Image (tube, rainbow, N blue to C red):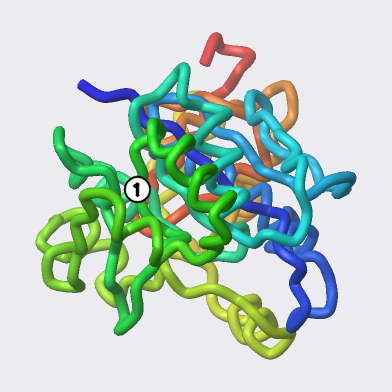
Amino acid sequence: MQTAAGVVLAGGRSSRMGQPKAWLEWHGSTLLYRATAVLARAVDGPVVVVAAPGQELPQVPSGVAVVEDPVEGLGPMQGLAVGLGAVADRAETAFVCSTDLPFLHPAFVRRVLRAMVPGTDVALPVARGFRQPLAAGYRTSLAGLVTDLLAAGDLRPGMLFKHCEAVQLSDAELLADAALARHDPTLESVVNVNSPEDYAAARDRQPPEVVVESFGALARNGGHRPRAVRAATLGAAATAAGLALDRHVVAALNGDQVTRDGSLPLVAGDTVTFLSADAGG
């Protein structure tokens, strides 16, 4: 088994957006918090954020590290080199993405990483008609090659693919994964937000549908019955269930991850079970 890391590139200039994308509000959290927390749900290794020199970032989930790119203005290839290098001693592969993928689903991340079989250096989705180098899988040992290409003046990700073994994943190949086909059938995982109009349209969409249920003392008035609600975060799911994530309540996400993090992003297909902490959870 290969350990997989997550790398989020947050140092882009956001020139079309007019403000740093990492700070954009997303249902009570930020785009950066959502991207890092979704990756943390999907990988078994470390998650790191690559920031531009001196860049101020919003809060990230506990356990997520921030590394600073020492060189500004070289684009995503430089961020890729820094990010892969930061996790190379702890993971063989990494899913690398930009911070502006508000609909990224853990099932998409897992599907891409499953393509990182021995002998494959890059798993490159070609989704919704475009190559997606900032929603792709990379072997962390490529950090040195990327650095060498940068030194030679090759700043485009496409140059990297000419020097390593890259496997392209079509829409059909991605959607052959049953979980991804069920929860993200139109591959909105790769939809990014580049302009204020993109962001407004994405933010105005309905949150994902999730299932909530309650047990123990919280199950009054039929609360134990699973029911579907629209919620982008754990906190929103608690509100929909008529609860508050205080010291008396904890939540189990999909039967295992126990947390009170109200900013934890939810995705289509999630089940949130609320438990009474006073009763020992």
193 vs 51: above or below: below
Residue at point 43%, 41% (across, down): 145
Look at mark 1 in the image and give the residue it sits on: 137
In this orientation, which residue lies closer to the viewer: 25 or 159? 159
Which of these two is toward me, 52 or 77? 77
The residue at 54%/76% (across/down) is 206
Residue 237 appears in the rendering: no
Q: Which amino acid lies under the numbered mark 1 shown in the image of this protein? A: Gly
Q: Position of residue 25 (x, y in %)?
A: 76, 64
Percent x, y for residue 12?
71, 63
- Residue at the top extreme, as displayed: 280
Q: Is residue 156 above or below residue 43?
A: below
Residue 96: horizontal and vertical position, in percent? Answer: 47, 49
Residue 18, image quadrant: bottom right
Seen from the viewer's position, the closer of residues 89 and 185 is 89
Q: Is residue 134 left or right of residue 193?
A: left
Residue 15, quarter of the rendered image: bottom right
* Quarter the N terminus occupies: top left
Give the residue drawn at x 12%, y 64%.
173
Q: Residue at x 45, y 30 (%)?
A: 215
Element at badge 1?
A: strand
**Residue ranking furthest to the bottom:** 197
When asked about the image quadrant of residue 114, the answer is top left
Q: Is residue 77 left or right of residue 20?
A: left
Please say whether residue 50 is visible from this viewpoint: yes
Taking depth in this image into account, of 247 and 24 the one nearest to the observer is: 24
Q: Residues within 10 Å of mark 1 (few under 14, many from 20)?
A: many
Residue 203, x across and y down, in percent: 64, 76
Q: Is residue 268 left or right of residue 192?
A: left
